[in-house]
Amino acid sequence: ANADNIRACDGVVAILDGVDVDSGTAAEVGFAFALDKWIAGLRTDFRQTGENEAAVVNLQVRHFIDASGGTLVTTIDDLEAVVEAWASTIGAG
């Protein structure tokens, strides 16, 4: 059912909190990217994760988010703003 829901949606919002991104969430991000879905990531966790101090999350997860045309944000307010901006483009063009 999860795969079917990702296939049916226009975009995905991934919650990326934790010492490392949850493996299921990482799989969903990769699957959504493979299906050419828009992806936004939210990380409110202040702990370091990823391969180095500058990485907010795993570099591959970050790549999928950025390459989808989405973005990674650190606040709910910013998430609301990017989702609203993206949603306003659905069907445009």
Image (cartoon, grey):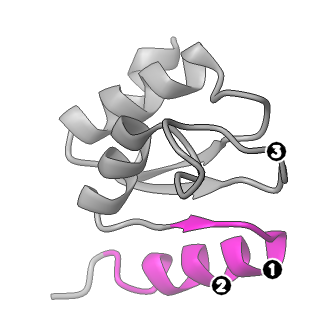
Residue 68, horizontal then vertical, whole percent: 28, 57
Residue plotted at (72% across, 53% down): 43
- State left or right for residue 78 relative to residue 77: left
Mark 2 or 3, closer to the camera: 3
Magenta range = 72-90
Q: Which residue lies under the disc numbered 1?
A: 77
In the rendered image, which quarter is residue 4 located in? top left
User: Please, what secondary structure does the residue beneath circle 3 have?
Assistant: loop
Answer above or below: position of 42 versus 82: above
Q: Which residue lies under the disc numbered 3?
A: 47
Amino acid type at circle 1 is: Asp
Of labels 2 and 3, earlier in sequence is: 3
User: Please, what secondary structure does the residue beneath circle 1 have?
Assistant: helix
Answer above or below: position of 27 versus 81: above
Q: Residues within 10 Å of mark 3 (few under 14, many from 20)?
A: few
Q: Which residue lies under the disc numbered 2?
A: 81
Residue plotted at (20% across, 33% down): 34
Q: Quadrant of the C terminus?
A: bottom left
Answer above or below: position of 29 versus 38: above
Of 16 and 6, the residue lying toward us: 16
Taking the magenta stretch, the answer to whether it contains residue 3 is no
Residue plotted at (32% across, 46% down): 64
User: Please, what secondary structure does the residue beneath circle 2 have?
Assistant: helix
Q: Are marks 2 and 1 in contact (CB under 8 Å)?
A: yes
In the rendered image, which quarter is residue 17 located in? top right
Q: Residues within 10 Å of mark 1 (few under 14, many from 20)?
A: few
Residue 83, horizontal then vertical, whole percent: 57, 73
For the question of whether residue 10 can be seen, the reply is no
Amino acid type at circle 2 is: Ala
Residue 32, horizontal then vertical, whole percent: 34, 36
